[in-house]
């Protein structure tokens, strides 16, 4: 099954994901990931701290052992064994920390991905659409993996600080003059680390932004591959997708330049400090203030104290991870579509009521002051010109989104107060461009909340949607894998209808769900909805004249308001502007089909 063509999304300005609020959101997400692997993260910290303690003990033990061996002290061999034990403990603890780090990284990444995906799927579709598909994929894959390294990297960073701090304390205990010599260079080290952190954060943020934009363009091109091939613009699209690669390369080189520059400066500063400590230590040895073993310990501790490389690497991982966490946490900022605890009354007819409903998008009211009572069991055609608000009306009716003002009730119960199970059990949807999910055609038709329908129900829904004949022609019928099924747009739409019919409740919302069907097939589907699908209320976003003719009630939208509601016959007779809504397609449709009957159902007309 080839993916539906999709127009390329307009170029967007880079996201504003820097600042205190996104940083706090990212830190909360990282804290949640750390808690998820709290035991393992604590074990990483314990192992790294213990390894650092062993590294701190090693110079003192080596120095003392050397002095004992030089004096031929009988306890020298025992201390030699202790040296070996300290070194072995450090190696073993480092190995354990590496293994645990891998586990923590994996679990933290999985936790962030689950949180992001749950929020993405649990928000209203228009909120999820804030992020392009390619960008969303990058946030949940590469950026989540980078952010997932933060808990363990933070533990390593804490442990990496212990050797330098402990080494300075040890120098003070062995000989204050050597410690003072080293401390003279500490301000330069602090400035070095501060500049490194600042420059790395800026560069990483830019690099990840370019990653998102490139991924977004790639997914757009993949979705519209057929259109690109037909237009012969493959070279142009390739250039558009790769246009930011020079910027990506520049930011990548800048990151390595920052890291390399810090390393180079520290490589120049560290030997100078070590030579200064060695010189002072030599003077103190000549003066008899310290022994040979103590001089060895001084040199080793000076090396540990100058271990800015380990601190720099750990800080770099934390900085990169926090920047990536801001990208992933943007998904966590999506508002959830919450649910209540109410259930629908048993045997309700599906009465739908709009009470002063207003929906705002981008600061403008798209639906305004909609008040409407739809009797249970009726079929309602929602008509209007393009941009009148029909799709949004359908989304609010089935609670794919909530109104900003007012409320929608089903059988007297506000949709906001229903449990998720009750809402999705009793409210079904079919769309103009359905996406088929599942392994096989049968899985796609039965897709939805448990319990799943049996083979008989799946086939009955397919017959009602006019899909059964072409499904039988597939290589393995209903067992054909979706990837192996060469489906046209109309066939995909019929499978989407079958999915809706298979789980039809007391309210069924069809958002232009027959637009890809020929007129005869669309008529057959309309008849099946009336005769073969579970009885209930039908909301049909209609562009065909026949859909309005067959409806019990027509809701005519104009400029986001209900201009009028009534039977098709009444509106057609008295409203010339209503007839103009169908003027483009009515003549051709009338020629293609038998004369359209006027529905026998007459309901009171309410003009607005």
Image (cartoon, rainbow, N blue to C red):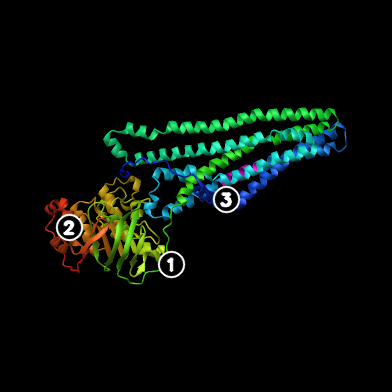
In the rendered image, residue 181, in percent from the top left (x then y), is placed at: 74, 32
10 Å neighbourhood of mark 1: few (<14), some, or many (≥20)? few
Residue 385 in percent (x, y) is at 22, 53
Range covered by the magenta-colored residues: 95-104
Circle nearer the N terminus (1, 3) = 3
As drawn, is 263 to the left or to the right of 436?
right
Q: Check disc 2 and report the residue beneath it.
A: 578
Between discs 2 and 1, the one toward the N terminus: 1
The answer to whether one can see residue 471 in this image is: no
**Mark closest to the chain's N terminus, 3 or 2:** 3
- Residue 19 forms part of the magenta stretch: no
- Mark 2 touching mark 1, by CB under 8 A? no
Q: In terms of image quadrants, where is residue 512?
A: bottom left
Q: Mark 1 points at which residue?
A: 341
User: How far apart are the two marked residues, 2 and 1, measured between alpha carbons?
Assistant: 41 Å
User: On the picture, is 573 further left or further right than 134?
Assistant: left
In-image side of 139 versus 46 (left or right): left
Q: Which of marks 3 and 2 is in front?
A: 2
For image coordinates 48% across by 42% down, the residue present is 142
Q: Residue 24 carries which label?
A: none
Instruction: Write down the residue under mark 3.
Output: 34
Q: How far apart are marks 3 and 2 (CA)?
A: 60 Å
Tag nearer the camera, 2 or 1: 2
**Nearer to me, 59 or 96:** 59
Q: Residue furthest bottom?
A: 346
Q: How crowded is mark 2: few (under 14 residues within 10 Å), some or many (20 or more)?
A: many
Question: Image quadrant for the C terminus?
Answer: bottom left
């Amino acid at each position: 099954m080839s993916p539906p063509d999709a127009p390329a999304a307009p170029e967007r300005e880079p996201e504003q994901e820097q600042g205190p609020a996104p940083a706090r959101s990212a830190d909360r997400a990282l804290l949640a990931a750390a808690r998820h692997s709290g035991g393992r993260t604590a074990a990483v910290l314990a192992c790294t701290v213990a390894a650092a303690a062993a590294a701190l003990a090693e110079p003192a033990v080596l120095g003392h052992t050397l002095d004992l061996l030089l004096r031929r002290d009988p306890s020298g061999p025992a201390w030699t064994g202790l040296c070996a034990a300290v070194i072995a403990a450090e190696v073993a603890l480092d190995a354990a920390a590496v293994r645990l780090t891998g586990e923590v990284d994996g679990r933290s990444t999985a936790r962030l991905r689950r949180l992001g995906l749950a929020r993405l799927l649990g928000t209203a579709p228009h909120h999820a659409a804030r992020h392009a598909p390619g960008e969303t994929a990058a946030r949940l894959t590469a950026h989540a993996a980078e952010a997932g390294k933060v808990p363990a990297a933070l533990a390593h960073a804490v442990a990496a600080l212990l050797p330098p701090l402990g080494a300075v304390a040890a120098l003070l205990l062995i000989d204050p003059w050597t410690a003072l010599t080293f401390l003279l260079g500490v301000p330069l080290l602090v400035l070095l680390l501060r500049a490194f952190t600042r420059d790395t954060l800026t560069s990483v943020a830019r690099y990840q932004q370019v990653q998102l934009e490139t991924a977004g363009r790639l997914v757009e091109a993949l979705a519209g591959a057929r259109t690109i091939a037909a237009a012969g613009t493959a070279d142009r699209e390739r250039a558009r997708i790769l246009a930011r690669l020079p910027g990506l390369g520049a930011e990548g080189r800048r990151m390595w330049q920052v890291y390399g520059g810090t390393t180079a400066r520290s490589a120049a500063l560290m030997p100078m400090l070590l030579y200064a400590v060695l010189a002072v230590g030599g003077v103190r040895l000549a003066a008899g203030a310290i022994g040979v073993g103590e001089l060895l310990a001084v040199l080793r501790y000076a090396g540990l104290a100058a271990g800015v490389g380990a601190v720099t690497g750990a800080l770099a991982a934390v900085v990169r991870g926090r920047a990536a966490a801001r990208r992933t946490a943007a998904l966590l900022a999506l508002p959830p579509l919450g649910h209540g605890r109410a259930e629908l009354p048993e045997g309700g007819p599906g009465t739908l009521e709009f009470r002063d409903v207003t929906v705002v998008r981008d600061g403008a009211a798209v639906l305004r002051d909609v008040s409407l009572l739809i009797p249970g069991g009726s079929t309602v055609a929602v008509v209007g010109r393009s941009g009148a608000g029909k799709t949004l009306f359908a989304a609010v009716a089935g609670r794919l989104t909530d109104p900003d003002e007012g409320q929608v009730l089903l059988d007297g119960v506000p949709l906001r107060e229903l449990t998720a199970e009750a809402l999705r059990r009793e409210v079904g949807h079919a769309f103009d461009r359905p996406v088929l999910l599942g392994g096989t055609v049968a899985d796609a038709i039965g897709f939805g909340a448990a319990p799943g329908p049996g083979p008989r129900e799946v086939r009955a829904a397919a017959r009602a949607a006019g899909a059964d004949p072409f499904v039988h022609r597939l290589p393995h019928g209903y067992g054909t894998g979706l990837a192996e099924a060469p489906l046209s747009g109309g066939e995909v739409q019929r499978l989407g209808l079958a999915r809706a019919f298979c789980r039809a409740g007391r309210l069924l919302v069809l958002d232009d769900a027959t637009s890809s069907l020929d007129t005869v097939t669309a008529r057959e589907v309309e008849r099946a909805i009336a005769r073969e699908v579970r009885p209930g209320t039908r909301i049909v976003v209609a562009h065909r004249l026949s859909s309005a003719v067959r409806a019990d009630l027509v809701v005519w939208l104009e400029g986001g308001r209900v201009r009028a509601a009534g039977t098709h016959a009444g509106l057609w007779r008295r409203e010339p502007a209503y007839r103009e809504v169908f003027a483009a397609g009515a003549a051709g449709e009338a020629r293609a089909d038998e004369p359209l009957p006027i529905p026998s159902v007459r309901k009171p007309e309410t003009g607005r």
